[in-house]
Image (cartoon, coloured by chain):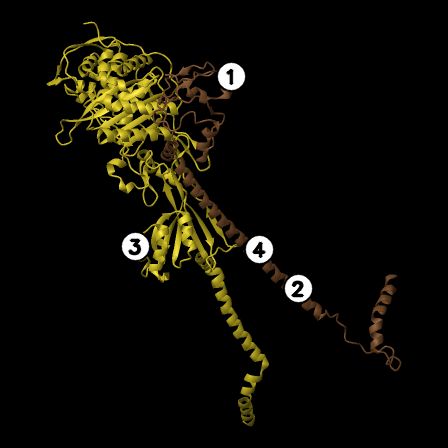
Chain colours: A yellow, B brown
Amino acid sequence: MSANRGGQNFSEYGTARIDLGNTRRRGTILIVVSTLILMIFAGRLIDLQAVQGNKLASAALDQRLTTVKLPAERGSILDSSGAPLAITVEAKNVTADQTMVTDPIFVAQALSPILGADADILANRLTGERRFMYLAKEVTPQTWEQISALRLPGIFSEDTSRRIYPAGELAANVIGFVGAQGSGLGGYEYAFNDQLSGTPGESTYERGSGGRAIPTGSSVRVDAQPGVDIELTIDRDIQYFAQKEIALAVQNSGAIDGTVVVMDPQSGQILALATAPTFDPSNPTQGTQKNLNNRPLTSAFEPGSTSKVMTLAAVINEGAATPYTPIKVPKFLLRGDKEFHDSTPHGTLNLTLSGVMAKSSNIGTILAAERIGGKKLSKYLERFGIGQPTGLGFPGETSGFVPEYKDWSPTSFPTIAFGQGLSVNAVQVASVFSTIANDGLRVEPSLVQKIVHADGSVEEPEAPVTTRVVSRETAIQVRAMLESVVGEGGTATNAKIPGYRVGGKTGTAQVVDERTGEYSEEVIASFAGMVPADDPQLVVTVFISQPRNGRYGGELGGPVFKKVAQYALGALEIPPTGSRSPKLALTFGG
Amino acid sequence: MSAAPHLEHSLNHSTESATEYATRGVRKRTRENLRLVAPMRVRKASRGMFVVVLASILGVGFFGMLLINTTLAQGAFTLSELRSTQTELNRMEATLIESVAALAAPTALEEKARSLGMVPSSTPAFIQIPSGKVLGKPRPAPGNRVATPADATVGEGVEAPSSSGLPPALGQTYDPAASDAKRGTGEWSEPTLIDSRVISEDLSFDSNPVQ
């Protein structure tokens, strides 16, 4: 007991001593505790590094990484010589942080003369709590430099680009226009939008706290692919001249609109595609919808007498007549339930086929066409490209309309023979004359010469489709007949160009009244011709719609043809052939 | 066997000094085989040396960092400088492209040409080389005469255009004699362009315009 008590005493007394003083035990506890703590640390470490490691690292990287879009430069639209028709230049948007502008009136007055904007409107835009507000869009870099030199607080800039049309209205109908977002909304700007815009790139980099790139950080940069340059077949100078002349002619004749097409018959390339009135591509919202259209391709009309070329070429090509074939032309002709007349009343005329062309006799043309019949005529129309797409792929283009042969009524055949009851666009007519000019071989018209990629590689469009429409001999005979139109006794003597042989055809087509569906008093006066007639290098067609002063294709279209062709001959350096025009008999001895 | 004494000798020699030092004065009074052993002398690296090494490592590290940072910063400065130069040049290019395009536009050219008294040629005509045959029917340009051909001597003829910033055409001179004949009639006579190089090729032109 005593020992026990003593032992108890000892133990009671000694417990504290052991706990505090036993170094070995204390050490053990320390080791265990610290091991536990270290295990927790290690566990957390493994969790952070191994288990969640990748996720956290990428989250952190995401925080630092920023991606900036690199806009692609829009390609240019050029003329056949590479002169710019539409180009993109650097520009700035001027923006404001309203909360940083302390004195809006003062700032507005400082900016007003530079931006050319009203100070009150600017002051309004500068007042408020918005942190981002546009003050002006697409100003030149110089303008922005002037503003930035003022060191106005709260005024910032934004990089952007601006589409400019250095030649103004020149070929606006072909080029088209772009919208506020810089994408094409009309014309070739629209049709080639994807190729013109290119592919935007992007730059991804690690960004430090100051917003600057961390030099050693990871970065990926995909450069923007600039858009392609499109080189048109349009000759800027000829286009300018044609546009000016047609605008003048439309104005002088009080017409509602007009078009001129200049074409190289051998290549099918369109050198000028002018229309008036047109629009300013830098300001398309000011133009009316009608004027935004590319009329030579988008508006269809009845060709009238210019269509007689196809009919008579078909008749000659079928061997049914020659330019000398005599045709007795009566006062009027009854076909179906309809009486057909010529534009000017006459008694019975003794005309040759050339005379029918030169005098533009409807009755004579019908009589000649009856030698081959409607079925063959409709085939020729199709081969001449009437009622077919031109192949230009222009947005909003019309193919015109020819009723199918099986749907022809008894009056259809005679009507279509002299150019009514079918509709065409101006380029189709130019293509018909080009076919005759190119010895009967039709070359599909083209407007795009080549596409130049950003890396300098050149993409040539596919070779145009060619169709043999009439034989070379036929074409030569038709051209001689066309010369008689411009010659003495013809309908277009004022289309004559001194020193050159000119062949062409006038047209005065009645316009169908949209309300009544009947022919109205309004006409489309036209002239389509080629020069030099014995070796044609140029085809020019002129259409003037609903003139007030003057009526006939010869008097209105002829002079425009002459001026445009004269200019183009000089510009393209086409010398006269020096040969003499044949004198075809227009009448025969009866 | 021959190496052992040598080894012993060298050993003795190396420890001799330490032992001698420790037992100096004791040696004679104690037994030969018992001697006081000095604590083994550890070859202590100098503390100063250690500090120097550490400091230099640290120094080199810091200096290296500084160098890298400076280089990077320098690079960043150069980059931003070049960027701003590029921006500046881009702006200049954009402006120049725009103004050239505007000046070269047909509308602007026509205006400029008309202000210089020029008119569009009406009928194109060509001279065939070398026969000298004239193709086409050249006509005098329409419009009012703004300068008498006689005034347009060599000096003055080129002066008017050059004052408008256009270079004079090379090798072209007006022949006042040819136009003098028509003077006073009030009728516009075409100033005949004489190109000396063409003349030397044995070609001649009528002094009167071909009608």
- On residue A121, the disc is 3
- For residue A212, above or below residue A569: below
Q: Are marks 1 and 3 in contact (CB under 8 Å)?
A: no
The amino acid sitting under disc 2 is Ser
- Report in which chain the residue with disc 3 lies: A
**Residue occupied by mark 4:** B71
- On residue B201, the disc is 1
- Report in which chain the residue with disc 1 lies: B
Q: Quadrant of residue A14?
A: bottom right
Q: Secondary structure at mark 1?
A: loop
Precedes in sequence: disc 2 or disc 4: 2
| Closer to viewer: mark 1 or mark 3 | 1
Where's residue B190, x and y in %? 40, 22
Query: How far, Cα to Cα, is label 4 from label 1?
Result: 70 Å
Work out which quarter of the rendered image holds the C terminus of chain A and state it: top left
Q: Residue furthest front?
A: B184
Is A298 displayed left or right of B130 in the figure?
A: left
3 and 2 marks on the same chain: no
Where's residue A512, x and y in %? 16, 27
The amino acid sitting under disc 1 is Glu
Precedes in sequence: disc 1 or disc 2: 2
4 and 1 marks on the same chain: yes
Label 3: how many residues lie within 10 Å, few (<14), some (14-19) or many (20+)?
A: few
Precedes in sequence: disc 4 or disc 1: 4
The amino acid sitting under disc 3 is Ile
Label 1: how many residues lie within 10 Å, few (<14), some (14-19) or many (20+)?
A: few
Q: Secondary structure at mark 2?
A: helix
